[in-house]
């Protein structure tokens, strides 16, 4: 496993971002929080389509929904973990798909640089409408009537799902330092979990303050797929509320992992 000090050094405001990198910037009125490192347990692993450049992932009633990126390869798929893909919607060649989330009987899919959010019928995958937005799209999640969206910075945007208008933002920090490269998102038991791009880490965020309250280093998962030289970064968090477990994978990974994250 990578040392936790590596996580601290790389994740907290060292990288290039669309946000102001000034070290004078501090999160808005947030108190520092003691960060926990609870660890995790791998429960099971399943085969995963290694042609999927995983961007978004969620599971409902045993069915996994996933978005794969890259222009010419972007698509929305559905499958039962461990079984072949049961349904696919191929995106136009100019689209680089990013995160997805469930909003009622719809699936929202954002895009990397096209500035579009596509809304699909969850059952048929039929495209029903589109929204336009400014900037990049990375991760997206729906919770308590609002959409939460990342753009690769340390900021999470809170959006009205009916209009796709930004209502406010959350500045995410760890030990008083902003944490950038927030990517794929997933709510679980009132907390927001996020992948960090180019890191083997997932962080647990208190959205009322923006403080990271726990961090998980998943480098062991890389070891389990390292035989495949084509794999890219860890990305994709799906929470199964019925079992209180997470499903995790990565871009072009041949495996999907069922994991219990510590409290």
Image: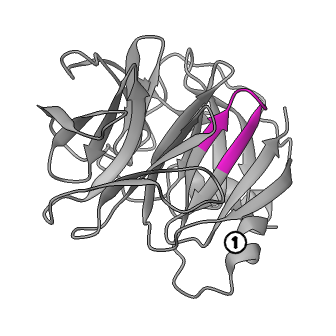
Q: Under tag 1, what secondary structure?
A: helix
Query: How far from the left and from the top, in percent, is residue 126?
Result: 22, 39
Q: Is residue 165 above or below residue 6?
A: above
Q: Is residue 198 above or below residue 19?
A: below
| Residue beneath disc 1 | 222
**Quadrant of the rendering where the N terminus is positioned:** bottom right
**Residue 220 visible:** yes
**Residue 181 visible:** no
Query: How far from the left and from the top, in percent, is residue 194?
Result: 56, 41
Q: Is residue 236 magenta?
A: no
Q: How is the image coloured?
A: one colour
Q: Residue at x 55, y 21 (%)?
A: 207
Query: How far from the left and from the top, in percent, is residue 30?
Result: 57, 19
Q: Is residue 178 above or below residue 49?
A: above
**Quadrant of the rendering where the C terminus is positioned:** top right
Residue segment shown in magenta? 238-247
Count of number-bearing discs: 1
Between 246 and 75, the residue placed more toward the observer is 75
Q: Residue at x 61, y 85 (%)?
A: 228
Tell me if 148 is positioned left or right of 261 in this view: left
Query: How far from the left and from the top, in percent, is residue 59?
Result: 57, 38
Tell me if 50 is positioned left or right of 114 in this view: right
Q: Residues within 10 Å of mark 1 (few under 14, many from 20)?
A: some
- Chief secondary structure of the magenta span? strand
Q: Residue at x 68, y 87 (%)?
A: 227
């Amino acid at each position: 496993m990578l040392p936790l000090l590596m996580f601290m050094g790389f994740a907290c405001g060292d990288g290039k971002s669309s946000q102001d990198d000034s070290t004078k910037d501090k999160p808005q009125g947030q108190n520092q929080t003691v960060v926990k490192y609870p660890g995790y347990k791998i429960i099971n692993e399943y085969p995963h389509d290694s042609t999927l450049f995983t961007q978004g992932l969620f599971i409902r009633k045993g069915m996994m929904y996933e978005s794969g990126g890259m222009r010419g390869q972007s698509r929305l798929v559905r499958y039962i973990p461990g079984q072949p893909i049961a349904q696919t919607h191929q995106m136009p060649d100019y689209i680089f798909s990013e995160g997805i989330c469930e909003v009622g009987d719809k699936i929202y899919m954002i895009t990397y640089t096209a500035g579009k959010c596509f809304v699909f019928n969850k059952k048929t995958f039929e495209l029903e409408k589109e929204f336009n937005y400014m900037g990049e799209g990375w991760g997206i999640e729906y919770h308590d009537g609002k959409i939460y969206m990342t753009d690769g910075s340390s900021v999470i945007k809170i959006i009205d799902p009916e209009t796709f208008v930004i209502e406010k933002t959350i500045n995410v920090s760890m030990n008083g330092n902003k944490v950038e490269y927030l990517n794929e998102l997933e709510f679980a038991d009132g907390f927001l979990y996020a992948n960090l791009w180019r890191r083997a880490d997932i962080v647990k965020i208190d959205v009322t303050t923006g403080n990271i309250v726990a961090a998980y280093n998943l480098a062991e998962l890389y070891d389990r797929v390292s035989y495949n030289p084509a794999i890219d970064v860890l990305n994709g968090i799906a929470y199964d509320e019925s079992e209180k477990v997470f499903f995790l994978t990565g871009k072009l990974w041949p495996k999907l992992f069922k994991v219990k994250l510590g409290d």
